[in-house]
Amino acid sequence: MHTPEESCPVTQIDPSDIRCRVLPFAILAPSPHNTQPWNVSFLGKERIVLSIDRERCIPGCDPLGRQAFISLGAFLENLDLAAKSFGFHADIDLFPGGWPDGKIVPDTPVAHVDMVEDQRVEYDPLFRQIPLRHTNRRTFRRDKVPLSLAGEITAAYDYSLVPLGFSHDAGLMGAVADLASTAMKIELADRERWRETVHYFRFTDAEARQSPDGFGLAQAGYGKVARFFIGKFFLSRKKAASSPSSFSRLVEKNTRAQAVSAGGMGWLSTKGDFRTDQVRAGRAFQRVHLKATELGLALHPFTQFLADYPEMATLRSSLYEYLGIPDTHTVQMLFRMGYASPVPAAPRRDIHEFLLP
Ligand SMILES: Cc1cc2nc3c(=O)[nH]c(=O)nc-3n(C[C@H](O)[C@H](O)[C@H](O)COP(=O)(O)O)c2cc1C
């Protein structure tokens, strides 16, 4: 498992190489189910080539790979912040081989990033939040998030192309809570989507130690002892396999409890839904989450009802109606915000596992 403080473990690369110094921060980006779908290679002395690791896509839950592209956007935002903090400009060229089709996940690079030393770049204080930002799945304290904080979050990024919607209206949040648990029910009703979800869920601490991806009860705020008893008596991989519907019911119930405890709901939308929109939304989302962290707010994405498979279409339309989003636009991320104690970090794979030869 990797922490940003460690030096780059790739022996064939000079650890003083700036690319080695920024990558440990880039890989702290969020990704659906913590799949970490990023492939990286180094070209020449200054270029990072970023592409999607298709082996780590989840075609059941994310059939168009939209969420994977959002995750790459978040990765690029972290990389950019880290570059600035080291006095470098990350010159990001998106889709250098031409714009890809919106329905397939390409093997071709998503970005070429040239690291150019430039002492004039301005340090961005959001960089400090990168290791502190974690998806928080606890039940929140129910205190409302003031509108002024939503305003501060909006000011933290270029919102013209990815506007932030926010509400702490009890009626809207109640409606979203209902939809969220129904969305979870629909998500887990399909065998493949259920399998992907369970594959990345860590039922025990031992599983979490063995697989530096996915997430488990620790990221929902359960302590060591609670995790031990839940794993032993209520929730195990074996029990979930022998009774898939009882696992699904538990998750639905939990989703509802999480949703009703929100202090506010936020969403990011784009006018188009091209790959560039998705990457841009990922960069915006990362800045939103980093700013929320700086402001002491917990944040937790709820994205099942944004999924692109046909069974979710009706529920997605209802959500758009509640949020006042025209169906010509795309809600890229929806998340609850509120107040809660922090949770431990979800694991990351070692840097060398992302690096292609
Ligand atoms: C596009 C996208 C969608 C996500 N959707 C959900 C979600 O519906 N529910 C959830 O609990 N977490 C969701 N997450 C959060 C990831 O599970 C989380 O980023 C990952 O486990 C890594 O943990 P971290 O964010 O604490 O680093 C999503 C993240 C991304 C980038």
Image (cartoon, helix red, strand yellow):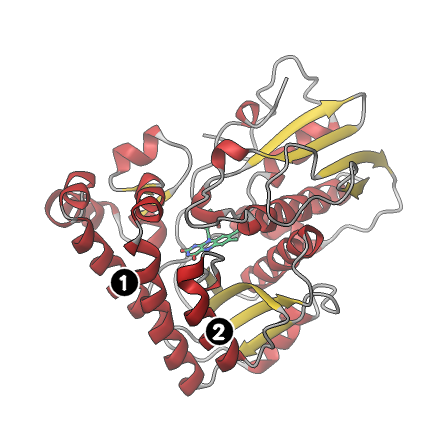
- Seen from the viewer's position, the closer of residues 74 and 146 is 74
Circle on res. 317 = 2
Q: Which residue is mark 1?
A: 252
Identity of the residue drawn at 49% across and 77% down: 145
Quadrant the C terminus occupies = top right
Residue 249: image x %, image y %?
A: 21, 60
Identity of the residue drawn at 63% across and 70% down: 329
- 209 horizontally vs 37: left or right: left
**Residue placed furthest toward the top:** 12
Q: What crowding class fits label 1: few (fewer than 14 Cα within 10 Å), some (14-19), or many (20 or more)?
A: many
Residue 188: image x %, image y %?
A: 30, 54
Q: Is residue 221 visible?
A: no
- Seen from the viewer's position, the closer of residues 41 and 189 is 189
- Compared to residue 25, the image places residue 267 above or below, namely below
| Secondary structure of the residue carrying numbered label 2 | helix
Quadrant the N terminus occupies = top left
| Secondary structure of the residue carrying numbered label 1 | helix
* Residue 40 position by quadrant: top right
Residue 215: image x %, image y %?
A: 37, 44
* Residue 92 position by quadrant: top right
**Residue placed furthest toward the left:** 233
Q: What crowding class fits label 2: few (fewer than 14 Cα within 10 Å), some (14-19), or many (20 or more)?
A: some
Q: Amino acid at mark 2?
A: Ser
